[in-house]
Image (cartoon, rainbow, N blue to C red):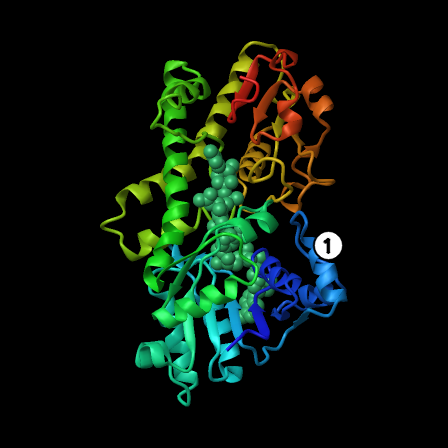
């Protein structure tokens, strides 16, 4: 059966680009979201999130009638679920959004439909989702009972796009296809091949779930290694960035970069899904998370020490010392401040510091609410000219363009190796 109508459940950073990609191939796409603001915005041909090149694709898709958004699930040939999977409590995966999404489509499922889970999920989540669907639709058969003969096909197909490059990577990246049966995988591959230029690589659902968690854990562990080196190098007064550059000249060494900590909604979250399910076997993954989560505390201590040194070397009071934090975003050259270690560092410093704390963030026009009344948003030039203690937190291109020679301050805590 070919795919005439495709429904994407959850129209956020993953769901909306995916819906737009199918619609751009002239497929009829119904996007479903519980957020009425998102639905109304999309139906006007606009977008409610920031992602390069997404806006024009959505506008064309809506104008040409291929993409429509609604709050109520409808009958379709394929469903892709891309709702949030945060953690709850002590880093346990919170599958409540996936459960709600699955239960919302169950009543409209028809024989022959394909259901794909795209949300980053713990191992076994796809089988659990198929179970929720089966409990609500005893009139239909599912892969866990009927194997390749099932009325409904179910697969796990994780997303691996990099925020900021989603519209390119969505099409070009290879895609892991984890069907609950070979037929499920074949159907899912057929669906993605509507827009995919990369390859569909077929496996089972558990391996696909673990593969997604593995990719982000690999990056987290490698960044933790770099962050740990930065602490050791600080003790020995070795330049960690030079060290890493030198070590990476070895043909089989490729160390990532240290920083103020790991931010975003994925790398700092997904490894915990492995730890929650296999606490005894995941000591390295847990330690990496702890190393990265502890880095902001270390940075704050370094800044406090720099302020103390600055005070000791002058006859000024603490309230007369100015700190400037450079960057708030969770990584360079984006405006996304969510789950950003730089935000937490700026906030803690401003609360602790008796004097003024300046913040320079070229990608925002005003201070986020969490920093209102605590910090002052300043221009790069203003901060460089007036601050006593500089804290480099994000290697935005504007900061890298400033030569280290132009930075005359003695007290610089540079977590990204931009000026020191
Ligand atoms: N943002 C990213 O770069 C990547 C995200 N992922 C994963 O993809 C999944 C989705 O992430 P994002 O798109 O970033 O999240 P998001 O928060 O941007 O979007 C999720 C959307 O789902 C909607 N939603 C929640 N419950 C719903 C329900 N029951 N029915 C319909 N809509 C519902 C929300 O209103 C929201 O618009 C997560 O599991 C995430 O870990 C995977 C790779 C990359
Ligand atoms: C393995 C991998 O590269 N995963 C990607 C990642 O996207 P995300 O934007 O969160 O990753 P990122 O660019 O590594 O940034 C995460 C955090 O790590 C920090 N970071 C990154 C690289 C580095 O050498 N040092 C470092 O400290 C960044 O500053 C940021 O705070 O997570 C995405 C996701 O799963 O949401 C995934 O789709 C992306 O492909």
Foreground residue, 301 or 179? 179
Q: Which element type, helix, strand or loop, lies under badge 1?
A: helix
Q: Which residue is more in the foreground, 412 or 225?
A: 225
Q: Residue at x 52, y 67 (%)?
A: 80
Judge whether 314 appears above or below 42 on screen: above
When asked about the image quadrant of residue 395, the answer is top right
Q: Is mark 1 within 8 Å of ligand 1?
A: no
Give residue 375's quadrant in the image. Answer: top right
Number of callouts: 1
Q: Nearer the viewer, residue 292 or 122?
A: 122
Residue 374 x/y as whole percent: 65, 37
Q: Is residue 263 visible?
A: no
Image coordinates of residue 102 in percent, x first then y, are 48, 74
Q: Is residue 378 visible?
A: yes
Residue 28 rendering spot, x and y as whole percentages: 64, 72
Name the spot of residue 37 as percent of width and height, x first.
70, 65
Query: Residue farthest to the bottom?
Result: 139
Identify which residue is drawn at 57% across, 59% down.
195
Q: Is residue 90 left or right of residue 410?
A: left
Answer above or below: position of 397 versus 340. above
For label 1, the crowd category at 10 Å Cα-Cα, with few meaning under 14, some 14 to 19 and many 20 or more, is: some
Q: Residue at x 37, y 58 (%)?
A: 208
Question: Which residue sits furthest left?
Answer: 280
Looking at the picture, tell me which residue is in the foreground, 176 or 310.
Answer: 176
Q: Is residue 267 above or below residue 374?
A: below
Identify the residue under disc 1. Answer: 56
Q: Is residue 43 above or below residue 158?
A: below
């Amino acid at each position: 059966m070919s795919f005439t109508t495709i429904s994407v459940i959850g129209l956020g950073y993953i769901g909306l680009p995916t819906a737009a990609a199918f619609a751009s191939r002239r497929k009829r796409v119904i996007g479903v979201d519980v957020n009425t603001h998102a639905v109304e915005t999309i139906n006007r041909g606009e977008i409610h999130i920031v992602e390069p090149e997404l806006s024009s694709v959505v506008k064309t898709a809506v104008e040409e009638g291929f993409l429509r958004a609604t709050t109520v699930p409808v009958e379709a040939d394929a469903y892709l679920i891309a709702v949030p999977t945060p953690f709850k409590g002590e880093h346990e995966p919170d599958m409540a959004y996936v459960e709600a999404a699955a239960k919302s489509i169950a009543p409209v499922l028809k024989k022959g439909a394909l259901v794909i889970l795209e949300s980053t999920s713990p191992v076994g989540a796809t089988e659990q989702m198929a179970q929720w669907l089966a409990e609500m639709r005893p009139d239909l058969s599912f892969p866990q009972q009927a194997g390749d003969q099932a009325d409904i096909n179910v697969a796990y197909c994780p997303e691996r796009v990099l925020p900021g490059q989603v519209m390119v990577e969505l099409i070009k990246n290879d895609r892991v296809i984890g069907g609950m049966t070979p037929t499920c995988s074949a159907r899912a591959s057929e669906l993605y091949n509507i827009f995919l230029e990369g390859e569909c690589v077929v496996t089972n659902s558990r391996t696909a779930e673990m593969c997604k968690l593995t990719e982000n854990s690999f990056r987290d562990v490698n960044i933790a290694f770099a962050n740990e080196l930065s602490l050791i190098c600080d003790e020995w007064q070795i330049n960690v960035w030079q060290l890493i550059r030198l070590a990476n000249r070895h043909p089989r060494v490729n160390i990532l970069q240290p920083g103020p900590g790991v931010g975003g909604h994925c790398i700092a979250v997904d490894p915990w899904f492995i730890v929650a399910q296999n606490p005894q076997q995941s000591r390295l993954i847990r330690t990496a998370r702890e190393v990265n989560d502890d880095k902001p505390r270390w940075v704050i201590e370094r800044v406090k020490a720099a302020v103390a040194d600055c005070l000791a070397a002058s006859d000024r009071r603490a309230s007369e010392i100015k700190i400037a934090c450079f960057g708030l975003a969770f990584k360079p050259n984006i405006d996304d401040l969510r789950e950003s270690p730089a935000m937490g560092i700026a906030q803690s410093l401003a609360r602790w510091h008796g004097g003024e704390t300046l913040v320079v963030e070229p990608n925002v026009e005003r201070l986020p609410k969490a920093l209102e009344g605590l910090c002052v948003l300043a221009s790069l030039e203003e901060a460089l000219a007036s601050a006593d203690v500089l804290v480099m937190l994000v290697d935005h291109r504007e900061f890298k363009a400033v030569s280290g020679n132009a930075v005359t301050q003695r007290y610089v805590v540079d977590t990204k190796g931009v000026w020191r």
